[in-house]
Image (spheres, grey):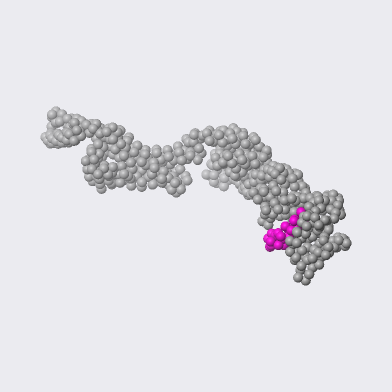
Amino acid sequence: MTPEEMRIELKRRQLTAMQSAASSNVERAKAANAGTLPQPSAVRSAEQTVIDQTASDEMLLGSLPPGLAQLQKFNQGIPFVGEYMDEFAGLFSPQARDQQRATMDAMDRQRPIQSTALGIAGGIVGGIPMAAAAGPAILAAAPQGLAARAVAGAAAGAVAGATEGAISGAGREYKDRGAGAARGAVLGGLFGAGAGVAAPLATAAATSIANRVKGMDVRKIAETLGIDQKAAQILKADLDATDFTAAQRNLDIAGPDAMIADASRPLREALDGAITGGGAASRIGNDAVSQRAAASGRKLDAVLDSTLGPPVGINAAARSISQRTAPARKAAYDRAYGTAIDYSGDAGRGIESVLARVPDSTMGAAIKEANEAMQAAGITNRQIMARIAPDGKVTFQEMPNVQQLDEIKKALGSVAAKEVDTFGRSTAAGNRAKGLARDLRDAVGEAVPSYKTAVRLGGDKIEADQALDMGRKLFGTGVTRENVRDTMSGASLEVKDQARQGVREYIDDTLARVRRSIDEPGEDTTETLKLLNILSSDDARQKLTVILGSAKSDRLLKEIDAAGKQFATRAAIATGSATGRREARRAATDDALAPGIIGNAERGLVGPTIRSTVQLLTRATPQAERASKQAALAQVAEALTKMRGQDAKDAMVIIERAIAGQPIKSADAARVGRVLGSAAALGGYQTASKLQLQQSGAR
């Protein structure tokens, strides 16, 4: 039979059934009026009508592709739009609309349970995306208490249910949309209010279940850290917020004395929170971190002394280095000064070439400075024989010897030192003078090798003083990495020592200016941490490497990094701990001075008296609760500070695996609860709505 023939046959059977039903109704009416029962033939006619209707429905359902009727019933349950699917189909084909309506009616008559289930499923599946989209805004405005959320849910559910019911009712009762909308609004409002009350209750239950499933990692944290589950639960949120890859790096940097609190900012804040709770946690946390910081400071001092030298003061440093090299330096310079220069050779002409490149104004100033320096030193027979014309031109009457050239070189260095801008940076004239001084030093060294030896051994006072000053200002903006490289390139041992000593004096002076306090070491810690951060910057690292060399700088920077991590933890507990201790002490005082049973009874306060009595009997007094809280916080403080070095790193690996291995993460537990709660509420709404419609025989 073709689809067209099947449609004609279906229409014929429907018409026959309608006629039979009409005739049966007429006969039954007559019998009722006559006061007699219907004849057996009338009963058989009604039964035949049902049989024919069933056959017609089954023929229709059997003619459809498998699953199409079920899909249409599923779509019909989608909120707001489901009841309009047939009319949407009618926009393209009236026959499709009529067939879809006949199909849904046939499903309601012949498959009532399946139809209801499919409608409920469509409502839930279609409603969850809407609930998820509106969820963030609803949660932001929702009250905090469960009872308040239930009341708010009832109101919101009634409005949403009435709206959905009116829209769907108008689509369902297409022959009388007004009546359908009114009826749907009433039913939807009632059922929506019930679903709104159920949603927060179901959400709370589902969240509780999700948290129980998730609780396995809390037990593993407690086992690993040697604390009870209450203390582990306190730490759980901070561990969830920790980047474990970065945590391992932080523990590596903090060194063999690293503690779990060093692993991340959330864990440092957890330690501070435990300490501010008062009780034993304050002593445990403060003692562990403060003692370690003191030990770290002593260790850093030792490394600074071994790599940079002990601090002795700027003036004492200059005198010490000069005195240490004085005998060897004097012998070397005496040999060099006693050696004549052959100006007729290539080396001598090289010296003349450098002198010729010095501008007359610079040369005049250098000669004047050199002669005055020798006169002040009592060297009266070594004056430089040169004539300075009115126009400033310099003419040597006698070519300078080694000592005179050395004084000219020193004078050029003095000129260079004076030629600086407002920021202390060398000007173009200063750079020229510095370069000419270096060229003259090298030219004299080529002519007189003993002079090169003397310069390499002792350098000169100006360069050494400049290196000392550069080291003291090394980490300021006035000293660039290029300045450091230029100063240290080919520098003598004395110049290198002076640069290192300048750095050491700067560090010692900075720490000496910090206000030391045993009771409140917050400022001490903050200033020390600032210094460590400066020393560990990329700019400082490169400068220190140039001055110290790779081996010594690596050792020093590793210790600076470790101290930085440890002092960061010290700073985290130094800022708020005093305030927290005062608040904890005030709360403990209030609890201790509370009236209690007798005091409340004497005041005639019935409610507080009963409450105090119950608290005493159940041992749930404020004092007991505070003691329990402080005991848990003491365990938290010990867990964050007790394990050190490799033990702390191993513990973090175990905890990371425990958290990562959970089927439900902490951040997802509440979300799972909301989804399951919403699904339960939508399911209840859809079930009530569909059953009510099924009973009323709508459509």
Residue 61 pos. (x, y %)? 24, 33
Q: In this view, does 689 lie above or below 419?
A: above
Residue in the image at 79% along x and 65% along y: 395
Please tell me which residue lies in front, 248 or 633.
248
Q: Nearer the viewer, residue 259 or 19?
A: 259
Provide residue 442's location: percent of width, then percent of height: 76, 54
Q: Is 439 in the magenta?
A: yes
Q: Who's the residue at 70% across and 59% down the image?
A: 431
Q: Which of 672 and 386 is in front in this view?
A: 386
As for residue 497 lying within the magenta part, the answer is no
User: How many marks on residues?
Assistant: 0
Residue under the point 84% across and 51% down? 332
Q: What residue span does the magenta drawing correspond to?
A: 417-442
Q: Residue at x 43, y 41 (%)?
A: 200
Of residues 358 and 561, the one drawn nearer to the viewer in this rendering: 358
Residue 1 seen in this snapshot: yes
Left or right of 330? Residue 276 is left
Which x, y percent locates residue 558? 68, 43
Give left or right: position of 690 versus 335. left
Overall secondary structure of the magenta section: helix
Placement of the C terminus among the 4 image quadrants: top left
Residue 125 in the image, given as x and y percentages of width and height: 37, 39
Residue 27 picture quarter = top left
Position of the N terminus by quadrant: top left
Residue 464 makes an appearance in the image: no
Give the residue at the far front of this rendering: 344
